[in-house]
Image: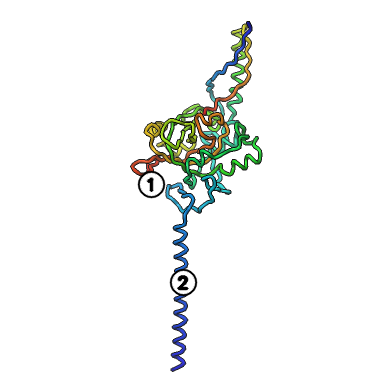
Amino acid sequence: MRFAGRRRGLLVYQLVLILLAIAVIIAIVIVVRSRRAHAPTAATTQSASGAVVPAAAPAMEHGLPVMPVKPQPKEITFDGCPPQGDGRDAELNRLKNRVDDGAWVSVPFDSVESLPWPSTVERRARRQWSTADRKAVAKWEGIPVQIEGYLAGAKVEGPETPNCHGADSKYRDWHIWLSSTPGKDRRRSIVVETTPRVRASHPAWRIGTLQALARRGDRVRISGWLMLDPEHPDQVGKTRGTIWEIHPIMRIEARRGGRWVSLDGASTD
Amino acid sequence: MRKAIRLQVTVWVEGEDEPAHDFFASTSKAVRDVVAAGAKAHPELRFTVKRVREDEGD
């Protein structure tokens, strides 16, 4: 009898110990999850569907995320025009002609507008760049960025090598100037461009809509791939503030009634 | 008085070509040929095409 009572007491004691251990483990898990959820992040990211997803808190430098490994561009042949276009800088054309969506990282306008580049790459095809210059540009090129600002203008560009010199307007880029303030001053703007092969998936995009956004001074949000175009350094300080571009643009949104509205028609906020 | 001038001329050239074929190479040669052929209409002038470059916009 006495022995049985002692044994029962030991069992109860062991059970209490196990329950306590489980309670401690649960408490630790709750605390860790709570801290992760409230940890400050340098940048938020948005998935292709527009939903804000938890960022992996990339290291930030110059206001931009440092991404040693970047998404590989997805390329297509568009109406017979290959990703490398019809001449000159095939490597540059391949970057301009990517069509993949990304997890857009919201970055300040100035972080791109004031981002430096090696002057020795200007007006030179990538195959002529030095290894050091390639490395310096590659640090930032190919980052999926999202920048807010105002449109300073938009126009249909002429026939170009990335688009195999297609004469029809549907084969031409749209040059759009993104500025940090409303107005037509392009001197400190960032050139952002839509390409024919991306527009094929966005039939609702209209050059007239972009020009109207510019006229009205509506706030816009542009998402796309950060890319260095070395062909227009002479325009810096005149019609652009930098040769860094968002090219191609993958998403265009406008602020309406306190919400971001996609030019494709669906609300994204 | 013998005179000379450098003229910058913007020419729009349009035609059929394979998408991936280098359109600049063929059209720049064509422009040189056109100038050479047209120069015969003005024997009093001597034409030299110094450079043909694509207008890359801004």
Callout 1: residue from which chain?
Answer: A
Distance from Cα at disc 2 to Cα at disc 1: 39 Å
At 46% from the left and 29% from the top, the residue drawn is A156
Helix, strand, or loop for circle 2? helix
**Which numbered dot is residue A261?**
none
**Which numbered dot is residue A24?**
2
Total numbered labels: 2
Q: In which quarter of the image is residue A127?
A: top right
Q: Which amino acid does label 1 sit on?
A: Asp
At 43% from the left and 30% from the top, the residue drawn is A184
Callout 2: residue from which chain?
Answer: A
Q: Which of A243 and A22 is in front in this view?
A: A243
Q: Are marks 2 and 1 on the same chain?
A: yes
Q: How far from the left and from the top, in percent, is residue A63? A: 51, 45
User: Would you call the spot at circle 2 few (<14 residues within 10 Å), some (14-19), or many (20 or more)?
Assistant: few
At 38% from the left and 34% from the top, the residue drawn is A217
- Residue that mark 1 sits on: A269
Q: In which quarter of the image is residue A139?
A: top right
Viewer-side label of 2, 1:
2
Q: Is residue A124 placed above or below B9 in the rendered structure?
A: below
At 64% from the left and 36% from the top, the residue drawn is A129
Q: Quadrant of the N terminus of chain A?
A: bottom left
Q: Nearer the viewer, residue A110 or B33?
A: A110
Q: How far from the left and from the top, in percent, is residue A18? A: 47, 77
Q: How far from the left and from the top, in percent, is residue B14? A: 53, 22
